[in-house]
Amino acid sequence: MAPDPWFSTYDSTCQIAQEIAEKIQQRNQCERRGEKTPKLTLTIRTLLKNLKVKIDTLKDLLLRAVSTRQMYPCKHVHLPSRRNLGHPDFSTPQGGLGLHTVA
């Protein structure tokens, strides 16, 4: 079985997040030594913008995978519309994802 198409996006998103953490740590060390950090700050901002794009892409891929039942072939999953995703119900057994399993 081929891996889900969102796996590669997830991996690259994690790599960007890791790189951001490393750059922030590097910038903090430079600031402690009294060095100027505008180049690192610019790099971090650029990486944060890239991370946002990757996260948005990942959300879309995951929503598509769930709605086409690629992630849950054994269950029927009802996915609410995107406008309802902004207010998760954390009291649900699904962990607040707003997904409702239909028998």
Image (cartoon, helix red, strand yellow):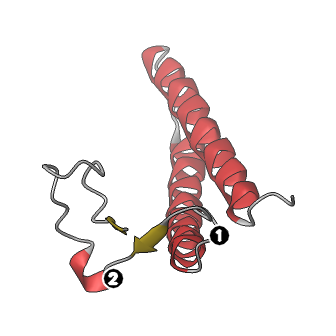
Residue extending farthest to the top is 33
- Residue drawn 52% across and 18% down? 29
Mark 1, residue position: 70
Secondary structure at badge 2 equals helix
Is 76 in front, or is 8? 76
**Is the residue marked by circle 1 packed among few (<14), some (14-19), or many (20+) residues within 10 Å?**
few
Image quarter where the C terminus lies is bottom left
Residue extending farthest to the front is 103
Q: Is residue 53 above or below residue 41?
A: below
Disc nearer the start of the sequence (2/1):
1
| Residue 89 x %, y % | 15, 59
Is 93 in front, or is 23? 93
Give residue 71's quadrant in the image: bottom right
Answer whether labels 2 and 1 touch (C-beta < 8 Å): no
Secondary structure at badge 1 equals loop
| Residue 18 x %, y % | 61, 36
Q: Is residue 21 above or below residue 31?
A: below
Horizontally, is 97 left or right of 45 in the view? left
| Residue 84 x %, y % | 22, 79
Horizontally, is 59 left or right of 91 in the view? right
Total number of numbered discs in the rendering:
2
**Is the residue marked by circle 2 packed among few (<14), some (14-19), or many (20+) residues within 10 Å?**
few
